[in-house]
Amino acid sequence: RLGKLYCIKYLTFLWNLLFSVLGLLILAFGIWGLLDKESLVSERIAHLGSDPMLFFVLVGLAVSTISLAGCMGALYENICLLKFFTGGVIAFVILEILGGLVLYSLRHQIKGSLQNTMLVAVLRYQDDPDLRFIMDEVQMGLQCCGVESYQDWKMNMYFNCSSPGVQACGVPASCCLNPLENGTITNSQCGFGALGMEEFAAQSIISLGGCAPQLSRWLHSHRGVLSACFVFLILVEVGGFLLATKLLADLAFARARGRQPGAW
């Protein structure tokens, strides 16, 4: 039975080690996003609470903290840390299931909210760095432009053809098919003048389709994969919970027989 205990112990340790790395990667991504948008400078720190990248920071902190507790609890056979880990996993699973049910039941309202958010991002593109960041990532990731079409950028006061600025009749560089020069530097002017072109000419420079229909198509075509990933994540978390629970039971049995806890 002692050999079985060590097997469960190191399986629990390795499981938590992998999730610790995942949590730290999520945390690093969130911090990178905050630094990239200069959200941590004194002028913008007051609006940090509304920054979407803060979500990744908080999730990364939570995942890495709970997983590191599981790592140390398994390695040093610490009952308190293992119980903290199992409680954290239960909380995560419950929140994920509730979140999934809410997203599914409110999917039509969420679709409308996403469209409204993208519309606001178009209108306030130059004024809100968070919305600009999100819109750029969506447009580059889905190879789309605007909400329903690239013509939506006419609603932006800077890109409207009546604007006196250099951006008049243009679209953001994230709409461009090839926004990078020499594969490294973003050409911020690649979309200038695109709104004044005929569609046939514009389609060789920018994406013409809007992001709302493109996002709907992407979600519809990947719904099976997304559902499978969600179920797989839940099962993996439940597996970690069962490993930790089994380790707790084996430790209790071993200690009842007089075995002292050890680090290795």
Image (cartoon, helix red, strand yellow):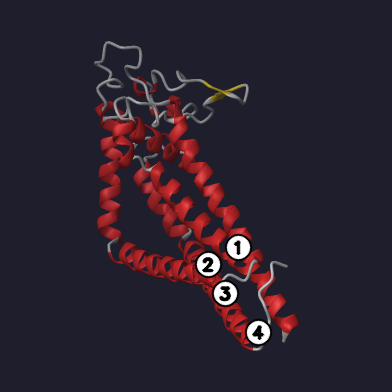
Q: Which of 104 and 220 is in front in this view?
A: 104
Q: In this view, does 181 lie to the left or right of 215?
A: right
Whether residue 99 is situated above or below residue 137 in the rendered picture: below
Q: Mark 1 points at which residue?
A: 72
Q: How many marks?
A: 4
State the image coordinates of residue 11 (x, y, percent, origin top left): 67, 71
Q: Mark 4 points at which residue?
A: 254
State the image coordinates of residue 198 (x, y, percent, origin top left): 38, 24
Q: Work out which quarter of the rendered image holds the C terminus and state it.
A: bottom right
Distance (Cα) linking label 3 and label 1: 12 Å
Q: Can residue 244 be seen in this view?
A: yes
Whether residue 230 is situated above or below residue 243 in the rendered picture: above
Q: Is residue 165 left or right of residue 205?
A: left
Please name which of the two marks, 4 or 1, marks the residue nearer to the observer.
4
State the image coordinates of residue 43 (x, y, percent, origin top left): 32, 25
State yes or no: discs 3 and 4 in contact (Cβ < 8 Å).
no
Please name which of the two marks, 3 or 1, marks the residue nearer to the observer.
1
Residue found 43% across the figure and 37% down from its top: 139
Q: Nearer the viewer, residue 15 or 213?
A: 15
Distance (Cα) linking label 3 and label 2: 10 Å
Per the image, label 1 sits on a secondary structure element best described as helix
Q: Work out which quarter of the rendered image holds the N terminus and state it.
A: bottom right
- The kind of residue tagged 3 is Ala
Whether residue 103 is situated above or below residue 147 in the rendered picture: below
Residue found 50% across the figure and 36% down from its top: 32
Whether residue 11 is situated above or below residue 146 in the rendered picture: below
State the image coordinates of residue 58 (x, y, percent, origin top left): 42, 50
Q: Which of 109 and 31 is in front in this view?
A: 31
Q: Mark 3 points at which residue?
A: 244
Q: Which of marks 4 and 2 is nearer the N terminus?
A: 2
- The kind of residue tagged 4 is Ala
